[in-house]
């Protein structure tokens, strides 16, 4: 899915801590140089304004749970967060409501189908199955506290800003562009309403959902947001508790099983990290207890995932010992008494 055939990367053990700062910085530089010239994939254009992105942009950010920052490339270039917002809105709703309510109303199982599938809803009696697909994300957004649409939207914007550690702002051009092309999301919302899965106005809910996807972030922001989940809900730069450790745990579990849509199993097999991507070119991948990767490159594959970002995560997961399941080297040292 991500690594070119025949590519080998030295595998570090994933248990224990991260390598030294020097190793991390050198590895980031190496990975950025290796994939910067990769021209596979295309800049997304089904949301017209996204087609304006420079295909040469490429940024890598790794932020440790302790707050140490490692970065290379276009890490301060802003882009719309798109579907990556789903993970953090899920966490905010679980924090303000409960994980049990979201589990009951939306679900936590992978659909095995595309992110915008109508069939997935129909086949499951109107239950979206998880908050990472569009139907489930819309249903989750509908659960955000607030007596008005404006209050719900502000709770989302301010909540995602706490994750990022800075005020996030709406990209009005992206929002307007998406609102002219989101007929399927509007149809999904009305379908959910017909099944009683959302009780708020479906079109208002889609408007809020479109706004959350249009918030501007950077690769640096994604790494901060991911590192907040990696450290039990505490933002590593501000020290602020954004969500509880239990909510952070539940969010990471959902991302591991559903974060990369129908490719989640393959992603977990290859890279071994909870992750979420966005069609504008961002990826956040989280190593619990260690930190998070934020990557940005606008060239995406047919599934809407950044090509360079996937390759970078593939390489860095192995080289830095981030894969949750790769502990053979540690086990070997224990057996040998080292």
Image (cartoon, rainbow, N blue to C red):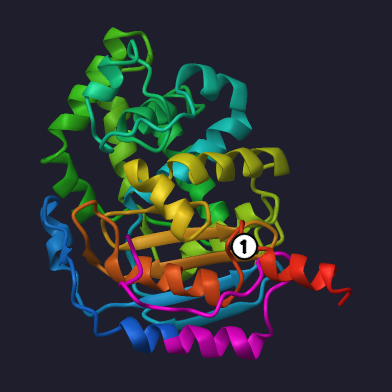
* Viewer can see residue 212: no
Q: Secondary structure at mark 1?
A: loop
Is 277 placed left or right of 325 in the picture? Answer: left
Q: Is 290 located above or below residue 249 in the figure?
A: below
Give the position of the C terminus as an image quadrant: bottom right
Residue 327 at least partly seen = yes
Residue beneath the point at 55% across and 77% down:
319
Q: Quadrant of the N terminus?
A: bottom left
Using the rendered view, name the quadrant where residue 66 is placed.
Answer: bottom right
The residue sitting at the right extreme is 337
Q: Is residue 193 magenta?
A: no
Q: Which residue is mark 1?
A: 326
* In the depicted structure, whether residue 113 falls above or below residue 213: above
Magenta segment boundaries in residue numbering: 1-30
Circle 1 residues within 10 Å: few <14, some 14–19, many ≥20:
some
Frontmost residue, 237 versus 269: 269
Q: How many marks?
A: 1
In the image, what residue occupies the spot 47% across and 44% down? 87
| Residue under the image location 62 percent in, 62 percent down | 326
Left or right, residue 154 beside residue 63: left
Q: Is residue 237 above or below residue 251?
A: below
Residue 21 picture location, percent across and down: 65, 86
| Main secondary structure type of the part rendered in magenta | loop
Q: Is residue 128 above or below residue 80?
A: above
Residue 190 is left or right of residue 167, and the answer is left
Q: Which x, y percent locates residue 318?
A: 53, 72
What residue appears at the point 32 percent right and 54 percent down from the top-left corner? 278
Furthest toward the front, the residue is 336
Q: Position of residue 289 (x, y in %)?
A: 70, 59
Q: Position of residue 165 (x, y in %)?
A: 57, 61
Where, by quadrant of the figure, is residue 112 drawn? top left
Location of residue 200 by image quarter = top left
């Amino acid at each position: 899915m991500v690594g070119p055939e025949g590519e080998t990367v030295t595998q570090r053990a994933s248990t224990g801590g991260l390598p030294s700062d020097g190793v991390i910085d050198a590895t980031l530089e190496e990975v950025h140089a290796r994939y910067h010239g990769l021209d596979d994939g295309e800049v997304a254009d089904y949301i017209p304004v996204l087609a304006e992105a420079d295909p040469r942009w490429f940024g890598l950010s790794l932020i440790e749970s302790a707050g140490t920052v490692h970065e290379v490339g276009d890490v301060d270039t802003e882009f719309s967060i798109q579907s990556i917002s789903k993970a953090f809105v899920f966490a905010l709703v679980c924090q303000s409501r409960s994980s049990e309510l979201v589990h009951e109303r939306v679900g936590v199982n992978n659909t095995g189908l595309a992110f915008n599938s109508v069939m997935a809803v129909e086949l499951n009696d109107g239950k979206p199955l998880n908050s990472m697909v569009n139907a489930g994300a819309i249903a989750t957004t509908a659960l955000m506290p607030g007596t008005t649409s404006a209050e719900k939207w502000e709770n989302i914007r301010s909540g995602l800003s706490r994750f990022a550690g800075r005020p996030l702002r709406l990209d009005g051009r992206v929002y307007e562009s998406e609102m002219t092309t989101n007929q399927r999301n509007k149809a999904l919302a009305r379908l959910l309403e017909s099944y009683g899965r959302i009780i708020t106005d479906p079109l208002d809910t889609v408007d809020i959902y479109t706004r959350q996807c249009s918030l501007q972030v950077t690769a640096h922001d994604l790494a901060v947001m991911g590192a907040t989940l990696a450290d039990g809900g505490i933002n590593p730069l501000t020290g602020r508790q954004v969500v509880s450790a239990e909510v952070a745990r539940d969010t990471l579990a959902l991302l591991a099983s559903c974060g990369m849509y129908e490719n989640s199993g393959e992603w977990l097999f290859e890279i071994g990290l909870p992750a979420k991507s966005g069609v504008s070119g961002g990826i956040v991948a989280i190593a619990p207890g260690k930190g998070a990767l934020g990557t940005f490159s606008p060239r995406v594959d047919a599934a809407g995932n950044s090509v360079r970002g996937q390759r970078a995560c593939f390489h860095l997961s192995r080289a830095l010992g981030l894969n949750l399941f790769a502990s053979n080297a540690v086990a070997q040292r224990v057996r040998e008494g080292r």
